[in-house]
Image (cartoon, helix red, strand yellow):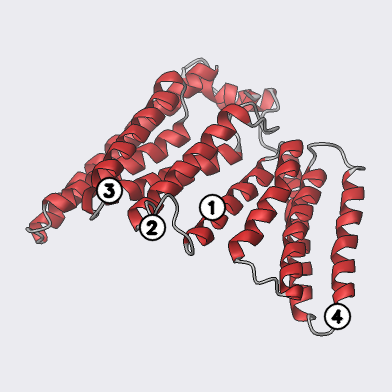
Amino acid sequence: MNKRTQLLTWQQQGRIKDIDKSLEVTQANIEPKTWFDFISKNLIILGFVSLAVGIIFFFAYNWNEMTKMTKFLLVQSLLVVSSGLYTQTNKYSHPSTGLLVFIALLIGALFALFGQTYQTGKDPWQLFLLWMLCITPIAVVSRNSILWIMWLALVNLSLFLYMQIHHLFWGLFSFFEGTTLFYALINAGAALLFFFVVQIKDSSKANLAFYAASLGAFFAFTWVSLYAVVGDSYQLICLIVYILWMAVTYYLFRLKSLDVMLLSAWSLSAIFFIMFVLTRLFENAFNAGTLLFFSIVLIAMTTFASKWLMQLLKESHGEAS
C-alpha cells in the first residue's frame, strides 16, 4: 500500500483533518514526473506493438514486389535481432516486455507468411493454434500479463474458428447456447489457471491476465443466463451452471477474499439476469406500464449495487490499512 492510499484511508477513518498538508509533508502527491514516467514506460510497449503492426502492413503492401526469400529473410532476421536485444534488457522491464510482445506478433506474422506463400490449404484455426502454442513458452518464461492476455485471445479465437467448421462432443456445442456455455467454461478455467497456477510478475494474485479472463467469463456467463431464461435448449443446464458460477465467485471474492472489481462485474451480471427474468415474465404484457416498472426496478437495483460496492471499497481500504 503506497503512502498516498494510506493517507487517504486514514482521512476516511477520521485520523487526518488536513489531507492536503499531510500529502505535502509526506511527498505523497502525484507529481508530473510520476505521470511522465508512467506514460513513457507504457509508450515503449505501444511503440513495439506499432512497429510490429507496421512491419505486417509493409509486407501486405509490398507483397508482389518482394520475392519469397526476401520475405522470409526479413521476418526471420527481425526475430533474431529482437531476440538478441531482449537478452540485453533487464528482465521484467518495460523494454523487455515490449520486445516480447514484438516477438510474439512477428511469430504470428511468420506463420501467416508461410501459409499465404505456399497456400497450404489449412484451416485458419490451425494458424492461430500454432501461434498460441509457440508463444506459450514465451508467456511462461516472461511471466507477463500482456503475453498471457494475447495467449488467451488466441485460445478463444482458435476455438471460435474451429467450432465454425467442426462440432465438439458430438454436436453438444453446435447450438448458440452450447457454444456460449463452452466459451464461459474456457474463460473461467483460464481465470482459475491465472489465479492458482500461473505465476505472473505483476503481483502474486491480482494481475491483468486474471482480470481479463474473469471479465470475459462474466460476459459469457451473462449470455448463458440469457439462454437459461429465453433459450430453446439447454435451459436447465445453463441455469444451473450460471447459478453455480455466481455462487462460487461470490464465495471466492466476497467471503474468502475481497475484490471489488470482480464484485462489480458480479453485480452487473446479476442485474442483467434479473432483467432477463422480468422480461420473460411480462413478455405477454409489454406496454408503457411495464416499461415504467422495469425502469424503477433497474434504478433501484443499480442504486443498491452502487451503495453496496462503495461500502465494500471502504471495507477493502480498512483491511489494507
- Checking the image for residue 66, the label placed there is 4
User: Going from the N terminus, do you reach mark 3 or mark 4 first?
Assistant: 4
Residue 219 can be seen, yes or no:
no
- Image coords of residue 217 (percent x, y): 45, 43
Q: The C terminus lies in which quarter of the figure?
A: top right
Marks 2/4: CA–CA distance: 42 Å
- Checking the image for residue 174, the label placed there is 2
Identify residue for label 3: 234
User: Going from the N terminus, do you reach mark 1 or mark 4 first?
Assistant: 4
> Which amino acid type corresponds to the residue marked 4 in the rendered image?
Met
Q: Is residue 172 above or below residue 121?
A: above
> Which amino acid type corresponds to the residue marked 3 in the rendered image?
Tyr
Camera-side mark, 1 or 3:
3
Q: Is residue 104 above or below residue 297?
A: below
User: Going from the N terminus, do you reach mark 1 or mark 2 first?
Assistant: 1
Q: Are marks 1 and 4 in contact (CB under 8 Å)?
A: no
